Image (cartoon, rainbow, N blue to C red):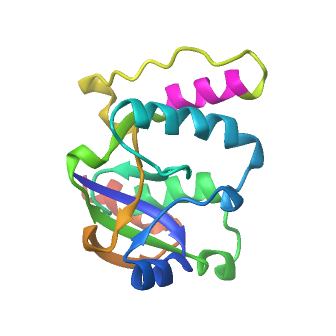
Amino acid sequence: MRLWTVQHRAVLESLEDAGELVGDWPRIMVWNYRACYEEMVAEMARRGLDCGGRPPVWAWAGPDTRDNSVAVTAELLLCPQTPEEYARYVVLDLDVPDEAVLLSLYGRWNDFMEAIIMGEGSPDMDWSIGQEELAAVQACLPRVAAGWVLGVRPLEPFRPEEDEDEEISS
């Protein structure tokens, strides 16, 4: 399954040294998300995906298209503002065995997280994905093996001129 993920540049060292990238609780960017991530880890365990007590690694369905769709998604999640902030991140293009991935819908996952964070308890998560929803699929992995990495590139900002070029050629 082709996936892409945006990670801090430091993970490249982990991939090289350990041969894999795994989640790390202290590196979760928003600490309030831990309870939600624990729910994802529990669902992954029910499906035979063992995170080894760590949070999952998040990715997106499809290859790294190297276009504005990747840039926009990364910017919405990470909010980089300066060239130095962009330079902190890399995009990994992955080819992951299907059995090593749990797919879910980003919108449903956010609704699920909101219920947990707002204290409404742990709602039931609808894990189904319809054909018409494939554009909003996120992927969780217990790890990223170095051998799954097809390519690595710096995260680049959204380029409005690319969208203009597409409109002109359409």
| Between 125 and 77, the one nearer to me in the picture | 125
Q: Main secondary structure of the magenta part?
A: helix
Q: Quadrant of residue 145?
A: bottom left
Q: Which residues are magenta?
A: 107-116
Task: Return the x and y of residue 60 as percentages of the image width and height.
Answer: 39, 50
Horizontal and vertical percent position of residue 140: 42, 46
- Residue found 68% across the figure and 42% down from its top: 34
- Note whether 74 is above or below 30 in the view shown: below
Residue 50 vertical placement versus 165 (above, below): above
Residue appearing at x 36%, y 37% in the figure:
103
Which of the pair 50/148 is nearer the observer? 50
The reply to whether residue 48 is in sight is: yes
Q: Is residue 44 above or below residue 123?
A: below
Residue 109 rendering spot, x and y as whole percentages? 53, 30
Q: Quadrant of residue 2?
A: bottom left
Horizontal relation, residue 157 to residue 4: left or right: right
In the rendered view, tell whether residue 3 sits above or below residue 136.
Answer: below
Residue 164 can be seen, yes or no: no
At 60% from the left and 60% from the top, the residue drawn is 24
Q: Does the magenta portion include 113?
A: yes
Residue 18 as seen in the image, left or right of residue 115: left
Please give the name of the residue rendered at 60% of the width and 75% of the height, measured from the top-left corner: 86
